[in-house]
Amino acid sequence: MEFFTNLITTALIFAVLCAFLCAVIQGYSGFGGGLIMVPIMALLFDPVLGIALSALPFFLGMLLIIPRSISDVNWSEVLPLSALSGLAILVGQNFLLSSSSENIKIIMGCFIVFIAILLLRNWKYTGKRNIFTSGIVGSSTGLVTGSLGIPGGPIMVMYFLSESKQPQVQRANILMTGFINTTVFILGFIYHGIFEQKVILQSGILVPFFIAGSFLGQYLFVTIPTKWFLKACSGMLILIGLIVVIA
């Protein structure tokens, strides 16, 4: 009985609700769920533990979504970007694991507010798209993901969204790059010994709720206008970012 009491805490119950709602956002847009879930989990737990609990549900949830989008992936952009991003993630994790919780929360909150403002202003990258720019975006994405634990990376998202391609292709590129990044991130945490038994069990409790939310998000993708949804998410990001900085 004591084992379950220690396992299922009040914070974990709130984390279940958070996982479901953020999975809806992730399933709908291909991104945004991590930007919202990670800071909330960092408040419920400490940043490293919160990020660890978020990583496995994201990985398994995306694993179910990926097959439907894989045929739309533009591999010529995704592969070089993901390769450099993966290397940068492992470098960034050293900062995450060696910094104080307060510093991580402040940087995380400020970055999320900044990204949310860019999304609200509908900022788009208008420069050239080649291996060099993909490398810069990949490295920046990896450093942000590794040092702050935000799955997928908003820098990569804005880069793909600024491309003049069909929404399905943009979403597939975002999902695949985010999936690769999450895989590398988890491997890095495994190497550093973060995934202890209790973390794995608590994370496993979140998985079914995250998967259910992901499927609901995919359904909403064809029923709710994209612009309305993204504006609502951006406003939510600003609020959460400010709370993380102040808390």
Image (cartoon, rainbow, N blue to C red):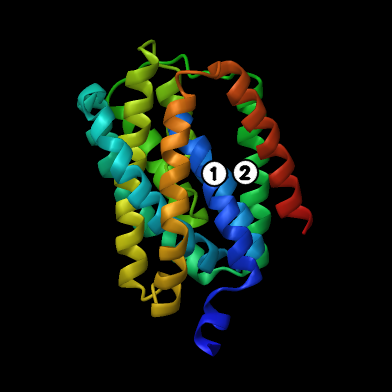
Look at the picture and state if 3 lies above or below 36.
below
Label 2 belongs to which residue? 111
As drawn, the residue found furthest toward the front would be: 1
- Which residue is depicted at the point 43% across and 16% down? 127
Look at the picture and state if 70 lies above or below 161.
below
As drawn, the residue found furthest toward the bottom would be: 2
Q: SS for tag 1? A: helix
Which callout, 2 or 1, points at the residue further toward the start of the chain?
Answer: 1
Picture quadrant where residue 171 is located:
top left
**Along the horizontal axis of the image, is 2 left or right of 191?**
right
Quadrant location, the C terminus: bottom right
* Tag of residue 22: 1
Looking at the picture, which amino acid does disc 2 mark? Phe
- Which residue is depicted at the point 35% across and 35% down? 175
x, y percentage for residue 134? 33, 30
In this view of the protein, can residue 88 be seen by the observer? no
Q: Residues within 10 Å of mark 2 (few under 14, many from 20)?
A: some
Decide which of 210, 184 is in the foreground and name it: 210
Looking at the picture, which amino acid does disc 1 mark? Cys
Q: Residues within 10 Å of mark 1 (few under 14, many from 20)?
A: many
x, y percentage for residue 26? 47, 37
- Which residue is depicted at the point 44% across and 21% down? 161
In this view of the protein, can residue 119 be seen by the observer? yes
How far is mark 2 from mark 1, CA to CA?
A: 18 Å
